Amino acid sequence: MNIHSGKYKCSDCGKSCQGRRALTTHRQIHSQEKPFECSVCGKRFTQASSLTVHSRIHSGEKPYKCRLCDKAFNQSTNLSIHMRVHSGSKPYRCSVCDKSFSLFTHLQQHEQCMHSNARPHLCSYCGKQFTAVTKLNYHVRVHTGAKPLSCGHCSEEFIWPSQLNTHLLKSHNEGTWFTCNICQKKFSRNGHLQQHMQRHEGVKSYVCDECPKSFCTAYELKKHQPAHSDYRQFSCFFCDARFKRKRDVNRHLKKCSAVHGISSLLL
């Protein structure tokens, strides 16, 4: 028990600290004071420990090593998350469909995409709407052509993190392949392997409410559902044409982009 919990208590948020120095350090969060500056890039931090972790970005130091594979990390929390790959632990469970996830952010994305119709984030280029701002930011790169993710070994640049991860695995043997023990197919993500295994097992947990069809993943069910309605969620960047399926709008975009003198642009 902390006998000083009442004495060293933050007046802004009520958090109790173990001593006066810890309380002073904590209060810098509320004051926005950032006395610790990175000597390489000039970024500032409220705590020395945060600067220490940040400095590893520049030094490349990764002191937290996985005991089961050759991966290493610059933060202990990242190592803890990585260990779920080996243990199969998925502590975050959806309250609607009981699907589980290894990361809380993945649970949030799942709930927004699969169990909510809210799409508050609007693309200023084409008007397309998204459930999460991260998905909007990725989408905007289609319009701008930005490739902010670069390979540390060569000059290749990428739009999506999955593209970079696959490149590192294929071209530089960096990272961990997830291999199917039945057909030996390899995947860059454990989640993709788990979905693939469901196909071998014949598991189709996602059933359409409108017809007898069932699917291995929620994404496949979501792609199927527009077949039962007139909702056309995919729109052309250049004209008012709208389509139910991504493959249809991409087929249209190849022709429409050529008319406008732009190289083929796909969703």
Image (cartoon, helix red, strand yellow):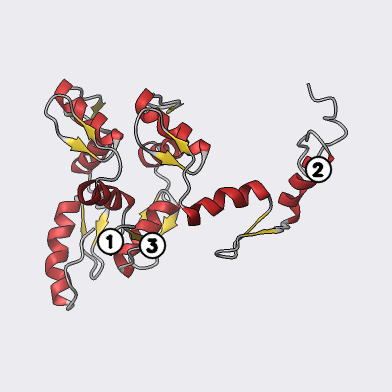
- Mark 2 or 3: in front is 2
Q: Amino acid at mark 1?
A: Cys
Which quarter of the image is occupied by the N terminus? top right
Q: Amino acid at mark 2?
A: Arg
Q: Residues within 10 Å of mark 1 (few under 14, many from 20)?
A: few
What is the number of callouts on the image? Answer: 3
Residue 156 or residue 29, whichever sits in front = 156
Give the x, y percent position of residue 106. Answer: 41, 38
| Residue 113: quadrant of the picture | top left
Q: Residues within 10 Å of mark 2 (few under 14, many from 20)?
A: few
Question: Can residue 148 be seen at all in this image of the molecule?
Answer: yes
Residue 153 or residue 157, whichever sits in front = 153
Relative placement, left or right, of 216 versus 51 is: left
Tell me how far mark 1 sits from mark 2, CA to CA: 46 Å
Query: Could you say whether the residue bearing mark 3 is in a helix, strand or loop?
Result: loop
| Residue 204: quadrant of the picture | top left
Per the rendering, the mark at residue 123 is 3
Query: Could you say whether the residue bearing mark 2 is in a helix, strand or loop?
Result: helix
Give the x, y percent position of residue 167. Answer: 24, 51
Question: Can residue 210 be seen at all in this image of the molecule?
Answer: no
- Image position of 226 with respect to 139: above or below: above
Q: Amino acid at mark 3?
A: Cys
> Residue visible at 21% across and 29% down?
216
> Residue visible at 20% across and 48% down?
170
- Mark 1 or 3: in front is 1
Residue 186 or residue 110, whichever sits in front = 186
Q: Earlier in the sequence, mark 2 or mark 3?
A: 2
Q: Residues within 10 Å of mark 3 (few under 14, many from 20)?
A: some
Query: Could you say whether the residue bearing mark 1 is in a helix, strand or loop?
Result: loop
Per the rendering, the mark at residue 154 is 1
Per the rendering, the mark at residue 21 is 2
